Image (cartoon, rainbow, N blue to C red):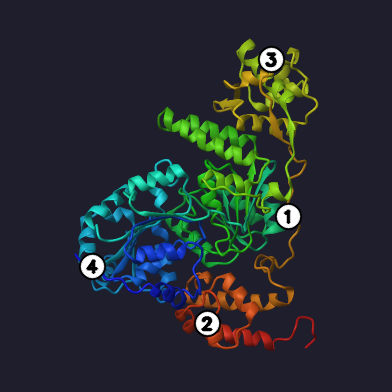
């Protein structure tokens, strides 16, 4: 096989403008695209919403042949292909959901050179027929999407991704580009090794997503807290609520629906047809809330997700950042909201203790959890902590997270820490008894509950010595002692035990600083009824125009059976609203309006704007 000839470099910028409707590349895109167009291998680490897809789609359109995209997202391949076809790109896929006839038609199109991009599930590469098919066509490049799936210590590990190292051996002259949204230095190294990308050029973009506001609130009544958050800040917005268990998913979805919020459940235990229908509705309809386990979300290309809420503590910072990154892909203001409490820590420790795997595996899970606890309990900027976890340093606080907007106070909690650790010591070492946080707090507060008196714990020297803190403050103190490794939990009931480091505090050799528990979690101000206008940051007089364009987009999408965002993103409608183009040539200069979309939807946009201009102002009496 001879190395395919490469088109002139300006072709990349031309494709960007003509097909995708953008005048300029985002930071880092040009270097990646030019490198791959020239035939080089690349490993790309770029945050969700940063424009990763263009880093293989444009080279595939510039190079001779078909770009082959390896993706684990079988359930989303149809939507990915539909989005590309809406741009005029010849795209297709091969996976187990197709009929024999559809598969043969797609294979013939590939061999005939009639496809720009072909999506494959990694499982298909195990089939000899797939490799033989690829040998019969011309391959422009291999794109390995969601490349973190190859890393066993990352999240979403997929064994079939290990097969992708063979691409280099079978097709050595075809460039490979592996892409993922989040990777710690350790995961980055593992991806490199497992995919044989040691000699590839590595591109690591800035992981910061400044449009996302990160917030962690103390968990008290999580359902009520979630409902208040949605009603006051995200009424009518699309969003995702993550829960740890399937039963929680269904209960929360039912609760939201009962309280007037359009919500759908998604977890692996649901019937496959129901899962597919719920996912399709979330992608195609405006304003739906998806309540899900982490089985949902990877590859979701819905740009107008305005919030991601977690009702349970994520298992790792890597998973948390991947999940929160599904908000605000369009660059508009969005929220990552997490409710977190003592029981979350107990639950996660119990899951680690009972997990499959050896001691090293459980130790690694514990390290992931410790990093997540550290992020939750920090008094510093959360964004600084997040970026630091991924090996990126930020010089100054972000100004758009809860710890920046409402600075946290820390206090010397050494004496209260000694009191709690002493209570655990008295019960465990003197009486050979183990109890959970609630019972220990009752002892410190001097409460003669039936359980306290039954065990004679009202005679302990630590009984009643903790009256200076409230119950909520003591629960926060226990949570922070766990986060700092000064306490640990074991067993189904979350009994508290001392650690090797506890003795330093008890002896007075170590001081303990804690974050002060807020009396009430701060929240954003109440949002006006037209929340979407706030999200896209429009002046009041422009809101009716934007809403009319959205209505046109929604009706058009419904007619065509595709998600509204495949026609135009909110950000594109916002620019149209502000610029009010009066001709197709003016509309063509709006970001996100490529040639195919201009021809297909341009007149509809102009007609809608003309109708808006002719409509009377609200309240004018005409």
Q: Are marks 2 and 1 in contact (CB under 8 Å)?
A: no
Relative depth, front residue between 178 and 493 = 178
Q: Is residue 375 above or below residue 463?
A: below
Q: Position of residue 434 (x, y in %)?
A: 61, 19
Q: Residue at x 41, y 77 (%)?
A: 88
Q: Is residue 327 above or below residue 359?
A: below
Circle 3 sits on which residue?
455
Disc sitting over residue 524 in the figure: 1
SS of the residue at dot 3?
A: loop
- Dot 3 or dot 2: first in sequence order is 3
Q: Are marks 1 and 3 in contact (CB under 8 Å)?
A: no
Disc sitting over residue 588 in the figure: 2
SS of the residue at dot 4?
A: loop
Relative depth, front residue between 279 and 543 = 543
Q: Residue at x 55, y 83 (%)?
A: 587
Q: Residue at x 58, y 86 (%)?
A: 606
SS of the residue at dot 1?
A: loop
Mark pair 2, 1: CA separation: 38 Å
Which quadrant: the C terminus? bottom right
- Dot 3 or dot 4: first in sequence order is 4
Q: Is residue 109 above or below residue 297?
A: below
Circle 4 sits on which residue?
137
Q: Are marks 3 and 2 in contact (CB under 8 Å)?
A: no
């Amino acid at each position: 096989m001879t190395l395919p000839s490469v088109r002139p470099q300006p072709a990349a910028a031309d494709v960007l403008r003509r097909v995708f409707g953008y005048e300029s590349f985002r930071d880092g895109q040009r270097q990646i695209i030019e490198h791959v167009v020239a035939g080089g291998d690349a490993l790309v680490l770029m945050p969700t919403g940063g424009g990763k897809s263009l880093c293989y789609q444009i080279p595939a359109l510039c190079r001779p042949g078909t770009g082959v995209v390896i993706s684990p997202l079988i359930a989303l391949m149809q939507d990915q292909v539909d989005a590309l076809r809406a741009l005029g790109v010849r795209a297709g896929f091969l996976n187990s959901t197709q009929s024999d006839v559809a598969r043969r038609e797609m294979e013939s199109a590939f061999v005939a050179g009639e496809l720009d991009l072909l999506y494959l599930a990694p499982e298909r590469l195990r089939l000899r027929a797939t490799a033989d098919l690829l040998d019969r066509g011309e391959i422009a490049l291999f794109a390995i999407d969601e490349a973190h799936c190859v890393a066993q210590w990352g999240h979403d590990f997929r064994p079939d991704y290990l097969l992708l190292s063979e691409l280099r051996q079978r097709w050595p002259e075809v460039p490979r580009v592996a892409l993922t949204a989040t990777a710690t230095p350790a995961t980055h190294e593992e991806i490199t090794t497992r995919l044989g990308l040691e000699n590839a050029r590595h591109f690591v973009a800035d992981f910061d997503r400044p449009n996302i506001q990160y917030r962690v609130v103390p968990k008290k009544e999580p359902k009520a807290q979630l409902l208040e958050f949605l009603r006051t800040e995200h009424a009518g917005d699309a969003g995702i609520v993550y829960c740890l268990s399937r039963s929680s998913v269904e209960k929360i979805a039912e609760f939201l629906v009962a309280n007037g919020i359009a919500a759908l459940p998604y977890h692996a235990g649901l019937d496959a047809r129901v899962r597919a229908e719920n996912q399709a509705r979330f992608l195609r309809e405006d304003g739906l809330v998806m309540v899900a386990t982490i089985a949902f979300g990877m590859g979701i290309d819905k740009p107008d997700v305005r919030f991601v809420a977690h009702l349970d503590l994520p298992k790792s910072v890597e998973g948390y950042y991947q999940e929160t990154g599904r908000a605000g892909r369009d660059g508009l203001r969005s929220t990552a909201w997490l409710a977190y409490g003592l029981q979350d820590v107990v639950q996660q420790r119990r899951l680690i203790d009972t997990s499959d795997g050896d001691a090293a595996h459980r130790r690694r899970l514990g390290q992931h959890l410790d990093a997540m606890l550290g992020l939750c309990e920090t008094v510093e900027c959360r964004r600084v902590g997040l970026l630091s976890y991924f090996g990126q340093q930020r010089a100054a606080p972000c100004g758009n997270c809860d710890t920046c907007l409402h600075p946290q106070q820390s206090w010397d909690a050494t004496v209260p820490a000694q009191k709690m650790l002493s209570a655990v010591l008295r019960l465990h070492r003197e009486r050979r008894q183990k109890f959970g946080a609630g019972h220990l707090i009752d002892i410190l507060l001097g409460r003669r509950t039936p359980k306290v008196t039954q065990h004679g714990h009202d005679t302990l020297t630590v009984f009643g010595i903790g009256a200076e803190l409230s119950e909520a403050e003591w629960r926060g103190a226990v949570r922070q002692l766990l986060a700092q490794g000064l306490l640990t939990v074991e067993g189904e009931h979350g009994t508290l035990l001392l650690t090797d480091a506890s003795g330093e505090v008890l002896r007075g050799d170590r001081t303990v600083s804690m974050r002060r528990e807020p009396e009430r979690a701060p929240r954003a101000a109440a949002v006006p009824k037209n929340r979407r206008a706030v999200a896209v940051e429009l002046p009041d007089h422009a809101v009716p125009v934007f809403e009319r364009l959205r209505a046109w987009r929604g009706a058009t999408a419904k007619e065509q059976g595709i998600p509204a965002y495949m026609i135009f993103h909110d950000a594109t409608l916002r620019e149209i609203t502000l610029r009010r183009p009066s001709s197709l040539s003016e509309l063509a200069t709006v970001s996100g309006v490529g040639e195919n979309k201009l021809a297909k939807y341009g007149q509809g946009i102009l007609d809608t704007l003309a109708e808006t201009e002719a409509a009377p102002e609200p309240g004018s009496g005409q």
